Amino acid sequence: MFLTISTTGTAERPATDLGFLLHKHPDKAQAFSTSYGKAHVLYPEASAERCTAALLLEVDAVALVRRGKGKGRGGAPDAALAQYVNDRPYAASSLLAVALSSVFSSAMKGTCQAKPDLPARPLPLRVEVPALPARGGAELVHKLFEPLGWTVTAAPVALDTEFPEWGDSRYVSLVLDGEQRLADALRHLYVLLPVLDDAKHYWVATDEVDKLLRAGEGWLSEHPEQKLITSRYLSRRWSLTRQAMERLELVRLAEADDSEVEEIDNAVDEQTDTEEKPVPLAVQRRDAIVAALKAADAARVLDLGCGQGQLVQELLRDPRFTEIVGVDVSMRALTIASRRLKLERMGERQAERVKLVQGSLAYTDKRLKGYDAAVLCEVIEHLDLPRLPALEYAVFGSARPRTVIVTTPNVEYNVRWETLPAGHVRHGDHRFEWTREQFRAWAGEVAERHGYGVQFVPVGPDDPEVGPPTQMAVFTATATTTAQRAKEEKAA
Amino acid sequence: MTSNETRVRTLPVTDLSLVVMIGASGSGKSTFARKHFKPTEVISSDFCRGLVADDENDQSASRDAFDVLHYIAGKRLAAGRRTVVDATNVQQESRKQLIELARKYDVLPIAIVLDVPEEVCAERNSSRTDRADMPRRVIQRHTRELRRSLRHLEREGFRKVHILRGVEEIESAGVRTEKRFNDLTHLTGPFDIIGDIHGCASELESLLGKLGYVDGAHPEGRTAVFVGDLVDRGPDTPGVLRRVMSMVASGDALCVPGNHENKYGRYLKGRKVQHTHGLAETIEQMEDESEEFKQRVREFVDGLVSHYVLDGGRLVVCHAGLPEKYHGRTSGRVRSHALYGETTGETDEFGLPVRYPWAEDYRGRAAVVYGHTPVPEATWLNNTICLDTGAVFGGKLTALRWPERELVDVPAERVWYEPVKPLASEAPGGHEGRPLDLADVHGRRVVETRHAGRVSVREENAAAALEVMSRFAVDPRLMPYLPPTMAPTATSRVEGYLEHPAEAFEQYRADGVERVVCEEKHMGSRAVALVCRDAEVAHERFGAGGGVSGSLYTRTGRPFFTESISGSAAGTAVTEEILGRLRSAVTEAGLWEELETDWVLLDAELLPWSLKASGLLRSQYAAVGAAAGAVFPGAVAALEGAAARGVDVADLLAKQRERAVDAASFTDAYRRYCWTTTGLDGVRLAPFQILAVQGRSLAGVPHDEQLTLIDRLVAGDPTGLLQTTRRLFVDTGDPASVRSGVDWWLEMTGRGGEGMVVKPVQAVVRSAEGRLVQPGIKCRGREYLRIIYGPEYTRPENLDRLRGRFLNHKRSLALREYALGLEALDRLAEGEPLWRVHEAVFGVLALESEPVDPRL
């Protein structure tokens, strides 16, 4: 990883003053030890007209991985996450920011004993970072540096010139030009390099807040992207550590299959929180479900595919629901649901009403038998169609609650979503989306096969042309079993 | 009081029973027991008093003493040993406890009463020093209570009551050990066990004919065994009864009762029963039969024994299946279990009682052959098999030849009776008895394997696997196998290398493997292909729906080609295209006939790697290359600038140049495994093993034979999809041969090849100590390992550190996964139900999420 800082000057105000400011003599190459490798400072050019200081950090990738004391069993969380194949030795990340602050600490503070008036003077500066990882792309780079008075040139780096179809990498080649005080420039880089990288190598500790406030003094409070900078810089300590712990088994399964963990660990959508922000179609959906449950006089309810537990939370508010079981296949979703419901702090009586369990509708499950109702809220579309019969049997054949409520998107309505490109599904993990006719056909056959009656209820604005955004089917068991018949006969 | 004439009596006592001696103190019970039973068979209350109180006559210790007595008796009965309780047992309360004990262990309670005059008892006691001071009233009370009990003993539950009166009768009496009715262990067959017939007389005649019976008798002296449910529902119950009864009478057949015979028997005795479940048909058909025949039927049904233990205890036949603890036992519970099976108390969606899946828990030594529950196919499960293949519902009538274990069946001539519930559910596994249940895979589990015993799966690993299996995998019916992980060769000390084949050859030599095969590694993605002859076969053999003719999936069970959203079947179409080409190749190579199969399961490598791993490639590999490519020109230029100014940066500059070269090599390394494909253009499949075919696991077929088959397969594909796997055979004990193996590898990896896998030619091999030997060891090429260990791993200081890697966990994992994979194939081959196969397959996936260094 590598960056250069250049300035220009005149005979009266030589560019080589940069050496004084940085406290590094232009005619020497100096090396400094940092915790992730050796940092070198050297000057490729140093004249009165033009002076460039280069910071080169030799990152030891092997040591980076081995820091986790895995001993082959991969015990520490990062032993599975970290890779020897790592961009850290090449890209300008938080490691470089740390090196910057330790090698140029006086310069960052703006002290210069040799020429005390120098630090306060803005200089014509040029900063070059040839490989800057930028989550958010060149656009964000502009947004972050331009408000600080820099002229920004950010050229995307291609992933692989031999495979142009792969597109650009997440790196940009960055050039900043501007009249800035050196200390300010360094503090900008110190904060914004890791913010753009958005993947810190160390656990963020509480003193990071102080560090951010110090480095951001004088510019951060006025920065239009203050919020993004702060949240990325502090990168939510709790979530970092938690993720590492929770996702481990899935990470390994992804690695075993040469795939990215995001491909299979997408049950919990971080960005959208599985909740459509603008209007609460999700709220309308829940209202409709609760109404249907009440109409069915259900007290013991299964929420199959409960995700992050929004519906469970809603049901808990109504004491008529005496037993609520949230079932999901994703352990991570269940953990988040448990946190949302504050299960650990819930009163005993209340806690007795609710249970969260891992389960899968690809299998029959004895634990799910004997409930009044089951809700499958936006669940079926997350299954590959060929595997839908297994779910059908698990719910309608094996668990057999009296009432089953199924909601799923109505694909016809997608044309009404302004933000949704034509032909796209509403969620990356949707394996299919059905028209009203397709849904009705499926529901009708299921009801027929398993002895249920079915009714359809629109959820959300019922568009005369394309129908409602969400379609809901309410199944009610009709078949009387021999046991029930026997009971009735006895009674008669 | 004393009888004048003395009869000599012989008391029949069943070989497995709880014999309760009843008599007053001093009546001679201990003497009698000693005389007629083995000393270890007899437990006396006096002895137990002594055990707990150091005094055989300490009455205050009675409660504890009887606790001990019951405990010991319970242990003996559980183990199937006759037990004689030597205590006064004159009180009903004490006998009641013993009867409960007998019932608990499903053995016959037998009473032997010694009725001796009070004076005799008193006299005997007084002559014994330890009982001399026993008050006379105690004996009087005993005698009184005994007299009061005599008439009730049968009603209390004793199945045999022997009363011996007077000293002489007692002294002259003998005891004869009797076998239980169900104990036919002396009969060794051979047998033909026939499933539920339900009045399908014509099918029965066809089946008997097919089995070689001529007019109810087998020329080779075989014995037919009927599992019951001869009657009801079908067209000709009288015909079936006539045939079976005459065969039983002539000794050509045995028959156990089904629940339908039982109900019909009750009807014949005039009890009130509902004429449901086909009884009405029987009654109607029997109307024209003679009273004499009806009477014979009544006696026949009445005389049926709940189950039989045959062939030296190796075979148990009963109607509804029987857990091992009930084999050979005799109680109402055993009878009811044998006739009706155990239910969970629930009813299913068709209103039928849900049956407890007892066979899943069965671990018994004896094979249990039964009927009762219609199944689409008779399949072995844990040494049990259900022969009710729904003949009356239009299925087939099935027989099992014993000891050959061959199935013989005839199809139903028509649907004689509409089933309430379809024979098979459409859910995965429904065709083999029951759909997959969460309990098959969830939580901490232990999977029994033939090759490596018990393999355990931890709860957290099962949880992760459940998510992947449920959300991303192909239909479990089409995923009968997942490939195990493979351990790398021991770390090399050769300069510049982390892995080198020398260690692999040496490891096999040390394990006693002489011949190994080196197979080129293709650096694609591991792929398993299930290729059926057509969609119909896929449906019949695997229960696949939707017209697919097989599957093609990754090592975690995910399909290679997924549906591109909005309902288009693009993924399926590409998969089917590949399966189609494979199918033609199999046909061309003549393997359907040669392997006697209509499907093959292939282990293969799908190329290019970029096809599946494109996400990973972009985010991980290409990204690193891109960052390095962007940073080095500037960094090197800066150093050159400084050097030109006379600053001493020579070392640093040299090092950065080397790093730049390493980074470029890294980019070259991954690029070799990437190329652009459109549709199937550019896609290659390199099969290297046929894992299984119908009825057979081929995992044990030596690799040289395997590769010959594979070569024919590849040759049978004119489209260029199939790619051959280059190989070299090496003798681990021959230095020249080993050297040629090393050279081969050096040459291949020198050109950028991924490396090779070394396998014992004999495939499944055990070491001298009986351990399973690694089925393969990978030796990855020097350049390829850059993708794994990073661009600069070859620098000496990096190699030194990387050599400190730990392989033991990976090796153990590889073996456990291998054992599970083999187990899945064996279960598949033996036609075990889906959930049994899936259990092992799921285990492989779960183990893959165990924490082990992912670079190994």
Image (cartoon, grey):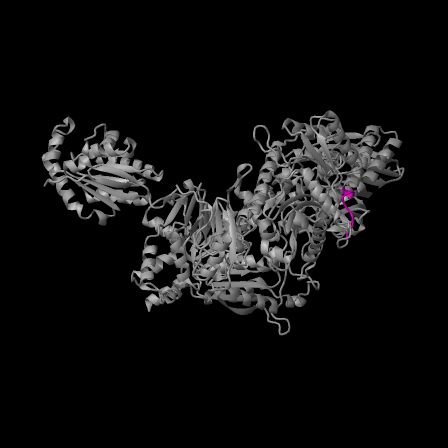
In what quadrant of the picture does the N terminus of chain B appear?
Answer: top left
x and y percentages locating residue A195 in the rendered image: 70, 46
- Find residue A108 and report its horizontal and vertical position in percent: 73, 38
Question: Closer to the camera, B207 or B112?
Answer: B207
Main SS of residues in magenta: loop
Quarter assignment of residue B84: top left
Q: Which image quarter is the C terminus of chain B in? A: top right
Q: Does the image show residue B508?
A: yes
In the displayed structure, B833 sits above or below B64; it is below
The image shows residue A134, relative to residue B271, as above or below, that is above
x and y, in percent, of residue B839 in the image: 54, 46
Q: Is residue A170 left or right of residue B300?
A: right
Q: Is residue B672 magenta?
A: yes
Q: Is B327 placed left or right of A442 in the picture? A: left
Q: Nearer the viewer, residue B613 or A468?
A: B613
Seen from the viewer's position, the closer of residues A372 and A369 is A369
Give the image location of residue A201, x and y in percent: 67, 39
Q: Which residues are magenta?
A: B670-677
Q: Is residue A280 visible?
A: no
Q: Quadrant of residue A462?
A: bottom right
Please give the count of numbered marks on the rendered protein. 0
At a point 64% along the width and 39% down the height, the residue shown is B701
Q: Residue furthest bottom?
A: A464
Asked whether B71 falls inside the magenta stretch, the response is: no
Q: Is residue B6 left or right of residue B669?
A: left
Q: Is residue B19 above or below residue B794?
A: below
